[in-house]
Amino acid sequence: MDDVARVVLAVEAQEVAEEVLHFLDRSGRARVVATAADDRQLHEAVRQLEPDAVVAEPTIASASVGSATLLTLAMRESVASLRAAVAAGADGFYVWPQEREGLLRHVNAIAAARRVPDRRATVIAVHAARGGAGCTFVAAQLAQALSDLGSACLLVECDLTYSDLTQALGYTDADTSSIADLASVGDDLGVEHVEGIRLRHDGGFGVLLGPADVGTVVTDDALRTVVGLAAASADVVVLHLPRELSSVARWCFEQADRVLEVLTLDVLSFRASTRALEALAPLAVRPRVSFVVNRAARSEITPGDVRRVFDEDPLAVIPADASVPRLQDHGRLTPARGRVGRAFARLAERLSADRAASEEEAS
């Protein structure tokens, strides 16, 4: 079956290995294709079988797992085992058997990803480490600007706690479809379901909104699958990320081809972004991060200070405009012909040119 994750299991204790093997195999979403008792056996199994996932004890997980997703499994939680998991680059850490359901959910997400068609989109993640810097504004305006260039653009709400895109784009909670509507689909989620909740904005782009009810639970696994399906059905996907560096937000950073970190010209914004990049250092995303200065106006701190602090010039500088707050209050975007609109047009052109250059280099 295409939607079954192929797993290599590396656990030293045979009785525990058998428990985990039977647990995963019985789920119907995983098949253990090999077991290993040490790092040498693990390395050889990964080399020969190229599994989708490796479930390994932290002390064994130091072996190379290639392109497989590494999930670490410990019999008890300790500082040493956590450090070993981090050093190995694990995507998850679980204590057996207490957290076996969490392990299974992660493996199910890997299995679900096998059903996602090949990615066609360039994925751009928009993040602001400081609240109020304008992450929602930049993500929405960028989606419009990319659409104006002729790209099939899909804007995806990944901040499912606040779902600010709903208000920012002029929608109401009562009459819109959202990602929460896919919860009942479960493991059969496909492109057709995502297309079913996709809204068409007047700005020319598609949008997947977050849930209207703050109490609605959308699992991280479901959101990962939605993002994967979105990337298979558009030319460009813009992810509107939450400020918090949650596990799913970190996953989005890893998936993104480009990350736009939104700054305002003040010390707190620069400090917050510096700390966020430090926290994300283990994900090695820094080479894909560019900076967008929002609401630029005369101040003691200037766009030139971006190079001094972050060692590169901002990719775009969006000027302050007194009409923007009024438009936002009415759920409207800035028109393309104004100063702000032209700044976003230049940003979209820059991103599109970089995308074209990357595709040409790859070919």
Image (cartoon, rainbow, N blue to C red):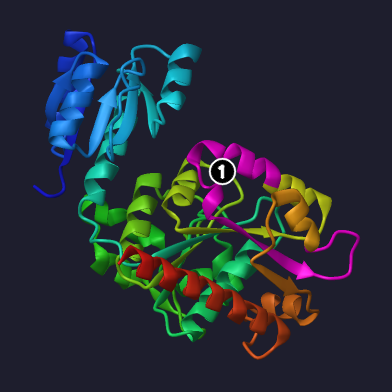
Q: Which residue is mark 1?
A: 245
Residue 30: percent from left, percent from top:
16, 36
Q: Is residue 288 magenta?
A: yes
Residue 31 seen in render: no
Residue 218 shows in this picture? yes
Q: Where residue 164 sits in the image (x, y, percent)? A: 59, 63
Residue drawn at x 39%, y 53% is 223
283 and 211: which is toward the camera = 283
232 vs 300, left or right, is left
- Residue at image x 74%, y 57%? 306
Q: Nearer the viewer, residue 179 or 248?
A: 248
Mark 1 residue type: Leu
Compared with residue 18, is residue 324 higher up or lower down, i.e. above or below?
below
Query: What segment is highlighted magenta in the picture?
Result: 274-303
Give the residue drawn at x 59%, y 70%. 167
The quadrant of the image that shows the C terminus is: bottom left
Rendering quarter of residue 22: top left
